[in-house]
Image (tube, rainbow, N blue to C red):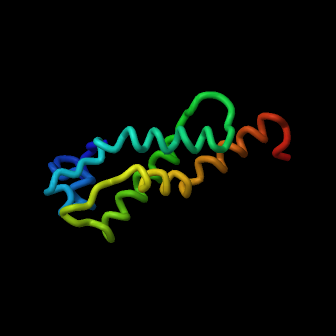
Amino acid sequence: MSTRTQLGSDWSFTRYYYPHAFEAGLRLETSAHFLWDAFSQAHQHAGLAGSVEIPMEYFSRAVEAILLDGLLRDAMDFQLAESHWTKVVQHCGYVASEQAVERNARGLGR
């Protein structure tokens, strides 16, 4: 999760969207376990079948929402908490999409 904003740039997405928090040490990669846990909990809470598999679309939506939130919340003392990740995963469409896939697999999506 430390991808750069542009080819040849040394600015990470965290630094771009959270410049003050970045200066104070915030790094997206330190939240990777929060993101995984949020998807795992959403999967379990919704009673989805099988193991957790996160389609890139929903992973990207969650990360994008966190980054855009930085435009409003950036501060030297800002920390990405588990609750931030839980909220964006709840709103990224992951559960609804996986439920639709399961319905279609059972022939109920018609």
In the image: residue 106, left or right of residue 16: right
Q: Position of residue 99 (x, y in %)?
A: 70, 44
Q: Position of residue 62 (x, y in %)?
A: 46, 52
Q: Total label count?
A: 0
Quadrant for the N terminus in the image: top left
Residue toward you, 3 or 95:
95
Q: Position of residue 109 (x, y in %)?
A: 81, 45
In the image: residue 60, left or right of residue 42: left
- Quarter of the image where one finds residue 69: bottom left
In the image: residue 72, left or right of residue 76: right
Q: Residue furthest top?
A: 50
Q: Check the image and report above or below for 31 versus 65.
A: above
Residue at 26% across, 61% down: 78
Q: Position of residue 87 (x, y in %)?
A: 49, 56
Residue toward you, 76 or 12:
76
Residue at 55% across, 33% down: 53
Residue at 59% across, 48% down: 94
- Quarter of the image where one finds residue 16: bottom left
Residue at 31% across, 68% down: 73
Residue toward you, 20 or 44:
44
Residue toward you, 18 or 43:
43
